[in-house]
Image: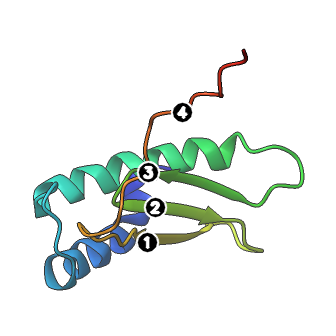
Amino acid sequence: MTAATFKSEIAEATRNYDKYVVCLEKTGEDVERALQSLVEKAIKAFENRGPGLRHGIALDRQVTVILSQTEGERPLCGIYFNLSSPYHRQKSSKVPKAPEEV
């Protein structure tokens, strides 16, 4: 199984990205490369998943790829665009200091 196995899903996601998604960080070509890479990572996660687990997942800030086990030979491939807003508050990376003891 390779990323080419999911060529139609990648093509459809790329078309939807070009039509519906506004992203300041990735061009259409960047998204296609990212999808190829994420599908390969999801395949590795899927093939190396633990007993009883049914999914392989790979993601970056803009896209999530999920491969799900089916009764057939080929897993289902879900490609999701992670929505966010530039107006969304970013979490502070600073850890609050504990009060000093006297």
Task: State the residue at coordinates (58%, 54%).
Answer: 57
Q: Nearer the viewer, mark 3 or mark 4?
A: 4
Q: Nearer the viewer, residue 101 or 38?
A: 101
Determine whether the residue tagged by mark 1 lies in a helix, strand or loop: strand
Task: Estimate how packed mark 2 is, as few (under 14), some (14 to 19) or many (20 or more) residues with alpha carbons within 10 Å.
Answer: some
Q: How is the image coloured?
A: rainbow
| Residue matched to label 3 | 91
Q: Earlier in the sequence, mark 1 or mark 2?
A: 2
Task: State the residue at coordinates (17%, 66%).
Answer: 23
- Residue type at mark 4? Val
In 3D space, how far apart are the residues under numbered discs 4 and 1 (Cα atoms)? 31 Å
Q: Earlier in the sequence, mark 1 or mark 3?
A: 1
Q: Nearer the viewer, mark 4 or mark 1?
A: 4
Q: Earlier in the sequence, mark 3 or mark 2?
A: 2
In 3D space, how far apart are the residues under numbered discs 3 and 4 (Cα atoms)? 11 Å
Residue extending furthest top?
102
62 sits to left or right of 6: left
| Residue matched to label 1 | 80
Q: Residue 54's x, y, as percent? A: 76, 61
Determine whether the residue tagged by mark 3 lies in a helix, strand or loop: loop
| Residue matched to label 2 | 64
| Residue matched to label 4 | 95
Task: State the residue at coordinates (12%, 61%).
Answer: 24
Q: Earlier in the sequence, mark 4 or mark 1?
A: 1
29 sits to left or right of 102: left
- Residue type at mark 1? Tyr
Q: Nearer the viewer, mark 4 or mark 2?
A: 4
The quarter of the picture where residue 101 lies is top right
Task: Estimate how packed mark 4 is, as few (under 14), some (14 to 19) or many (20 or more) residues with alpha carbons within 10 Å.
Answer: few
Q: Nearer the viewer, residue 98 or 88?
A: 98
Q: Residue 49's x, y, as percent? A: 74, 45
